[in-house]
Amino acid sequence: DPDPAFDDCSDSSHTSTSPLAVATGKNIGDLLNTRNVSWGWFQGGFAPSGTNPAGFAVCGHTHQNIGGNTVIDYSPHHNPFEYYKSTANPKHLPPSSEAAIGHTDQANHQYDLSDFYTTLKDGNMPAVSFLKAAEYQDAHPGYSDPLDEQTFLASTINQIEKSKFWKNTAIVISYDDSDGWYDHQKPVIVNGSNTSLDAAICSSKPIRLANIPVRCGFSQRLPMLVISPWSRTNYVSHQLTNIASIIKFAENNWLGGKRIGGGSFDAISNSLSGMLQFFAPHIDPVILDPATGAVVKN
């Protein structure tokens, strides 16, 4: 994937691609802004480590993964909101204050992961937060490991569960691809494609919305977990959902069901509501040891 076209931060002396290719249309951030709903994208390594000779920010912070390999924290193409001028923070400017996190200022809702832990501790967590681990903890094969991912997930969720926000929080853990390793089941194709590149797996008739060519979907089954005081216990959902179901949940909960439009998959995705039950919540948190994954007795 190319680097976001509106992201000046690089892990080297080179800047990323021209801002002329910035994506058009709306995203969930735009919709939340119209309703004054606080939100933020928090990504490991987003804060610059310095500047290059041309004066552009450099995102050069690194960590060692569990295998001892040094990995650059920030991955530009993992940040979806940097593709849109309306929600981008191309110079990676910090929030003007802790109180401004989640609201529109010079950071434009784009933050370093450390800002999430700060605002969580100070009691100002946004209504909607998207968290992306630094590369060494994002479980991507080649530079991360499931145990790195476990450390990130358990330590982050522990902090949320210990905060004042826990009783009103739903944490959704999702994955973006499987590389074909997860599943023996053939994908359930719910939408056709108008490109011959998808012909091998997507032969159904393409659907067109407002003359926008739509993508083939869905692909392989992937894990999705909903962790909340309101989650159904001892329950596995059999409802077909996808990553856009998370966006649909936010739209239903904060935006009165308003959709992004333009062929976005939120319009055809099922909701996450079946994974939650809004009675008799189980407020007591379950704290895990980030190193072992074992339950820690409170």
Image: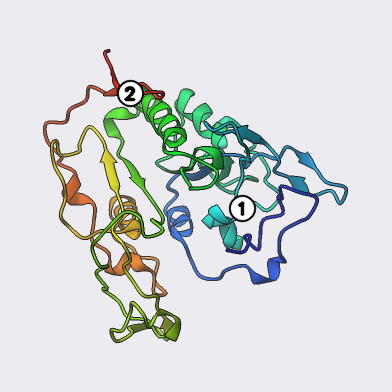
Q: Which residue is mark 2?
A: 288
Helix, strand, or loop for circle 1?
helix
Quadrant of the frame with the C terminus: top left
Q: Residue furthest right?
A: 53
Query: How many residues crowd around disc 2 within 10 Å: few (fewer than 14), some, or many (20 or more)?
Result: some
Q: Is residue 121 visible from the viewing direction of this image?
A: yes
Q: Is 165 on the left-hand or right-hand side of 14? A: left
In percent of width and height, residue 204 lies at 28, 84
The relative height of residue 188 versus residue 150 in the rendered view (above or below) is below
Q: Which residue is mark 1?
A: 76
Residue 68 spot, x, y in % from top left? 59, 31
Tell me what residue is drawn at x 42 percent, y 38 percent: 146
- Residue at (26, 24) in percent of width and height: 286
| Amino acid type of the residue tagged 2 in the rendering | Leu
Residue 186, by quadrant, is bottom left
Describe the element under mark 2 as helix, strand or loop: strand
Which residue is rendered at x = 23% and y = 57% of the image? 271
In the image: residue 194, left or right of residue 48: left
Nearer to me, 189 or 164:
189
Give the quadrant of the N terminus: bottom right
Q: Which mark is residue 135?
A: none
Name the residue at the top extreme.
298
Q: Position of residue 62 (x, y in %)?
A: 65, 36
Q: Amino acid at mark 1?
A: Pro
- Give whichever of discs 1 and 2 has the lower sequence position: 1
Residue in the foreground of this view, choosing between 138 and 54: 138
